[in-house]
Image: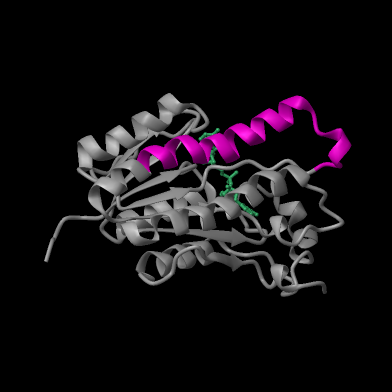
Amino acid sequence: MSTEKRVAIVTGASQGIGEAVSNFLVAKGYRVVGNSRNIKPSGYDDQINIAGDIGDPEVAQKVVDTAVERFGRIDTLINNAGQFIAKPFVEYTVEDYERLLSVNLSGFFHITQRAAAQMLKQGTGHIVNITTSLADQPLASVPAALASLTKGGLNAVTRSLAIEYADKGIRVNAISPGIIKTPMHAPETHEFLANLHPMKRMGEIREIVQAVTFLEEAGFVTGEILHVDGGQHAGHW
Ligand SMILES: NC(=O)c1ccc[n+]([C@@H]2O[C@H](COP(=O)([O-])OP(=O)(O)OC[C@H]3O[C@@H](n4cnc5c(N)ncnc54)[C@H](OP(=O)(O)O)[C@@H]3O)[C@@H](O)[C@H]2O)c1
């Protein structure tokens, strides 16, 4: 049996969900390449951080090259970098639109193409896209059509790539969070946000890490949109 450590790429790894996922994976014995625009060097031998905008194909190339050249392979890609802008549809600016398409979609596309090419060579790999339950269950009190446009696209491409790669050793899944207590949300908004879930609370970062853990070990699961959202996607409440 191979004793080689698994290798993961985590985008948006400087804070919030991405930081927790990369810390967890390193603690589990993975080697990790982390990315975000402002990420600092990691200080661990088993994590190399590459700063840059993941919407830029050159940054995506550098992240993938680092994983392959320094750690030899790519077992897991966690497409976590993402931004969220909630506003009424007609108030979105061209800059809002371009920013969300860049990080949420180009930030998926460039790195996933490159990582998938490496996984195809290996004949094994796992891609996890972090989306949002707002794409399945919009909320009247939080208009966020660009979240649905971009993250809904990630849900769709998750299924599409799951089928394309099902017989090639590569699984493709998504985690669809409700509203999670990360630096994205100021503490004074937490009570309002808690009430946007049937379970009447926000999610914790560790609950997204649990979903990553499950999907990593779930060899017969692909094309799954795993909702971790206190019941938001299940219906009206
Ligand atoms: N928190 C929630 O309630 C919630 C709900 C549903 C879905 N999600 C999704 O979960 C993911 C993580 O959310 P979070 O709450 O942990 O967010 P967060 O605390 O705001 O962190 C976002 C991370 O993405 C990085 N990032 C942003 N733009 C980037 C870019 N262009 N290129 C590279 N990195 C970039 C940020 O670092 P830099 O600033 O250094 O670039 C940071 O590390 C996102 O995709 C988000 O849409 C979150």
Q: Please tell me which residue is depicted at 63% across the width and 41% down the height of the picture.
A: 83
Task: Using the rendered view, name the quadrant where residue 226 is placed.
Answer: bottom right
Specify the segment rendered in magenta: 87-115
Instruction: Check the picture and name the quadrant holding the N terminus.
Output: bottom left
Q: Please tell me which residue is depicted at 72% across the width and 56% down the height of the picture.
A: 134
Task: In this rendered view, identify the residue nearer to me: 99 or 111.
Answer: 111
Can I make out residue 175 in this image?
yes
Query: Which image quadrant shows ligand 1?
Result: top right
Can I make out residue 41 in this image?
no
Specify the color scheme.
one colour
Is 96 colored magenta in this rendering?
Answer: yes
Instruction: Check the picture and name the quadrant holding the C terminus.
Output: bottom right
Q: Give the side of residue 2 with respect to residue 107, left or right.
A: left
Q: Is residue 60 above or below residue 32?
A: above
Position in image of residue 35 (x %, y %): 42, 37
Task: Using the rendered view, name the quadrant where residue 202 is placed.
Answer: bottom right
Q: Please tell me which residue is depicted at 46% across the width and 68% down the height of the picture.
A: 210
Is 57 colored magenta in this rendering?
Answer: no
Position in image of residue 94 (x %, y %): 76, 26
Task: In this rendered view, identify the residue nearer to me: 100 or 219.
Answer: 219
Position in image of residue 20 (x %, y %): 45, 54
Please identify the dominant SS of the magenta region.
Answer: helix
Task: In this rendered view, identify the residue nearer to me: 199 or 233.
Answer: 233
Task: In this rendered view, identify the residue nearer to me: 157 or 80.
Answer: 157
Position in image of residue 150 (x %, y %): 65, 44
Q: Please tell me which residue is depicted at 79% across the width and 66% down the height of the picture.
A: 195
Q: Give the side of residue 219 with respect to residue 87, left or right.
A: left
Q: Give the side of residue 92 with respect to residue 152, left or right.
A: right
Report the label total: 0
